[in-house]
Amino acid sequence: MTIHIGAKKGDIAPTVLMPGDPLRAKWAAENFLSDARLVNQVRGMLGYTGTYRGNPVTIHGSGMGMPSLSIYVNELIRDYDAQTLIRIGSCGGMQPQVGIRDVILAMTATTINTPSAGIFKEINFAPCADYGLLSAAVEASKSKGAKTHVGGIYSSDVFYDERPDLNEQLTRHGILGVEMEAAELYNLAARYGRRALVVLTVSDHLQTGEALPADQREQSFGDMVEIALEAAFA
């Protein structure tokens, strides 16, 4: 057990999928894992462990934002020896060719600030995905027929952003979408020598204002979960 994770030793699998919403972790575990069991519920952050095609998998919430994710990823790696961590979440599209329900595979994650900034000091470290996971996710996306984009995303440390000038420059430089956790996941994976990938479903669009209705999100997010699971065990 740790401060934030009540799981016992052996309760956490080497492969961990991490949605931000703990209830999405519950939904994914119930729909994609066999014999899923609750292994954590400290502070309402749900974690489940089961199997996917015979492979042990944990699906554990990360909360919203990089500081929250940093807590869980640090503990999952240091105390439970997680080896592969894949964020599965939603994002806002930023390019005209990126549509609602499309999948984005984050090759890199640009950000203004992360919990790791104090370590890097003046260095602008460039966190990125594990290439093996990324290439496997590309193949999994093709087999599913999902419309997928591979490239850079932006990890914001604020949800209610009031920087239209920044969004304009990010779009100008090809950033595909915006979310709030990926950059710190990639930082921590690099620090501990673990594999990490971020797989996102576009739920709304900053340019068009279009948004996916709540009752349609689960069906669309299913592709993302399957791509992540297939990539983990390719």
Image (cartoon, grey):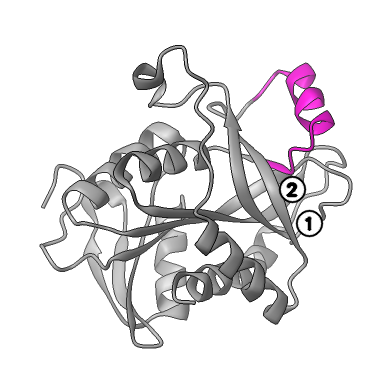
Marking on residue 128: none
Considering depth in this image, is 211 or 17 the residue closer to the camera?
Answer: 17
Considering depth in this image, is 77 or 24 the residue closer to the camera?
Answer: 77
Mark 1 and mark 2 residues within 8 Å of each other at the beta carbon: yes
Q: Is residue 201 above or below residue 222?
A: above
Residue under pointer 2:
204
Residue sitting at 49 percent across and 27 percent down?
A: 125
Amino acid at circle 1:
Ile
Amino acid at circle 2:
Asp
Residue sitting at 40 percent across and 67 percent down?
A: 26
Q: Position of residue 9 (x, y in %)?
A: 10, 63
Q: Is residue 211 above or below residue 12?
A: above
Mark 2 nearby-residue class (10 Å; few <14, some 14–19, many ≥20): many
Q: Quadrant of residue 138?
A: bottom right
Q: Is residue 225 above or below residue 63?
A: below
Q: Is residue 172 magenta?
A: yes
Side of 80 relative to 46 (left or right): left
Specify start and end residues of the magenta stretch as a single range. Answer: 161-177
Mark 1 nearby-residue class (10 Å; few <14, some 14–19, many ≥20): some
Considering the numbered disc 2 on the image, is that residue within a helix, a strand or a loop?
A: strand
Q: Quadrant of residue 36?
A: bottom left
Q: Position of residue 22 (x, y in %)?
A: 40, 56
Considering the numbered disc 1 on the image, is that residue within a helix, a strand or a loop?
A: loop
Side of 14 relative to 136 (left or right): left
Q: Position of residue 74 (x, y in %)?
A: 27, 42
* Residue 219 visible to the viewer: no
Residue sitting at 54 percent across and 32 percent down?
A: 126
Side of 105 relative to 230 (left or right): right
Residue sitting at 78 percent across and 40 percent down?
A: 94
* Residue 203 visible to the viewer: yes
Residue under pointer 1:
100
Q: Position of residue 104 (x, y in %)?
A: 68, 55
